[in-house]
Amino acid sequence: MAMEIRQQFPISETAKVCDYGCGSLRIGAHFITSQAPGSYFGIDVSEDFIAYGKELLGEQLLLAKRPRLGKISTELDEVAAAGVDLLFSTDVASHVHPDEKPEYFDNIKKIVHRTGSAAVILAITAERTVRYQRSGWAWPLGYYEESMRPLSLTKDRFRKTIVRNGYKLNSIMLTFQREA
């Protein structure tokens, strides 16, 4: 996934990158190692999950790269103020409860507020809204487009067709750009 995002967005090492839903940092680690110190932001709902990711990265890499890691509830404003160039959110969109979905989109739009900044969201889509597992929802592509306005969908790179509990779904990488 990290390689796919980097191919789509060849970003400089000084670009500010935010992993929204960073969790264990398995994707974020690929960005942390190639970004300048202090230019990676990782936020999640669980401090415990972030602590696990820190263990996996190791103290030496954490000291050298100084990623800024924390909970969405306490770090959102700081991340938004940093002027992020690229935000990515891997597999979060399909697990956010429908009642929390507007906040998820609003948070992303708050972070991706500068002209030219972008958000890459790995989403599960379907022709109609489907709850395909206990904490898994698929939404129509149009739902994402509407929810992310005023950001514009610039790419919808198909990844693969998947089947979950008998539903045929699409795993898609959606790219939204902040225009003027």
Image (cartoon, grey):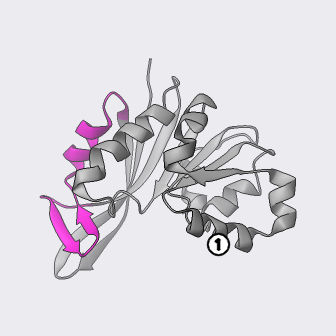
Q: Quadrant of the C terminus?
A: top left
Seen as rendered, the residue at the extreme front is 74
- Asked if residue 85 shows in the view, the reply is no
Seen as rendered, the residue at the extreme left is 128
Where does the image place residue 40, in percent across and percent down from the top left?
Answer: 68, 47
Residue 98's place in the image compared with 27, above or below, is above
Q: Give the range drawn in magenta.
A: 125-152
**Residue 151 is drawn in which quadrant?**
top left
Where does the image place residue 12, in percent across and percent down from the top left?
Answer: 72, 40
Asked whether 54 or 150 is in front, the reply is: 54
Which residue is pictured at 12% across the width and 58% down the height? 128
Where does the image place residue 42, in percent across and percent down from the top left?
Answer: 61, 52
Residue 85's place in the image compared with 29, above or below, is above
Q: Does the magenta stretch include residue 27?
A: no
Q: Name the residue under label 1.
A: 52
**Residue 158 is drawn in which quadrant?**
bottom left
